[in-house]
Amino acid sequence: MTRRLFALWTVLAALALSGCAKTQPTATQNDIDDLAQAIQSLDPKVDPAEAQQAATIAYSYSRQLKHEWNVTDSAIIHNAKIINGFREMGLCNDWAQAMTTRLRQENFRTLDLHWATSPPTQFRIIHHSALISAKGDSMYDGIILDPWRASGALTWAPVQEDTRYNWRPRLDVREELISGELPY
């Protein structure tokens, strides 16, 4: 009974808050070109065609997944829908896995892909995202590709500038959570 009551309150809260969610505009060619330029700027050895391809996929695949996963609300509301069984996919780790997998299919010669994780804190849940860097570079020199936080509209930024999250290698965070080193 408690679970059903919680589910009912979650759905009611989601419906009430869904009016607060705003529709994200569709990405323009300028948005794609800006991301391509940022990727190309990671290193002089980055192939401009690969940078353009990665940027195009990052934007178009985010839009495709938003549609396939029926993401119609803010990320947090969508998470609540998944937790309560109203949606199947769309948690941040779903986005990270899908984006990383899709971009890896391109077999880029001059770019590497990473799965970044921001560990949980007292006021924030764990967050995952795909990340792209120049071949051989650390994830800390790359660019976050995060469609989750804007509900399918791609948010991207150089890792060092994305201070909203404490991005780290996924497996390092996982190990710290398993060992109990992270308290949350």
Image (spheres, helix red, strand yellow):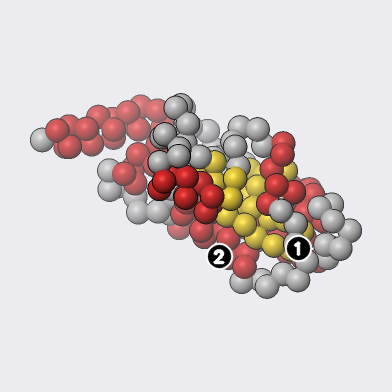
Q: Are marks 1 and 2 in contact (CB under 8 Å)?
A: no
Q: Which mark is residue 101?
A: 2
In this image, 173 relative to 108: left or right?
left
Q: Nearer the viewer, residue 38 or 25?
A: 38
Q: Which quadrant of the structure image shows residue 16?
A: top left
At x 68%, y 73%, the residue is 107
Q: Residues within 10 Å of mark 2 (few under 14, many from 20)?
A: few
The label nearer to you, 1 versus 2, is 1
**Residue 81 falls left or right of residue 58:** left
Specify whether 175 is left or right of 15: right
Tell me if I can see residue 165 in this picture: yes
What residue is shown at x 45% (from left), y 39% (from top)? Answer: 181
Q: Residue at x 55, y 65 (%)?
A: 101
Residue 27 location (% of width, % of height): 67, 48
Q: Say whether residue 148 is visible.
A: no
Q: How many marks?
A: 2
Residue denoted by label 1? 135
Q: Residue at x 59, y 36 (%)?
A: 165
Using the image, determine if residue 82 lies above or below residue 76: below
> Picture coordinates of residue 97 (x, y %)?
51, 58
Left or right: 42, with 96 as reference point: right
The quarter of the picture where residue 58 lies is bottom right
Quarter of the figure with the N terminus: top left
Q: Position of residue 98 (x, y in %)?
A: 52, 60
Real-space Cα distance between discs 1 and 2? 17 Å
Q: Sequence order check: which comes first, mark 1 or mark 2?
A: 2
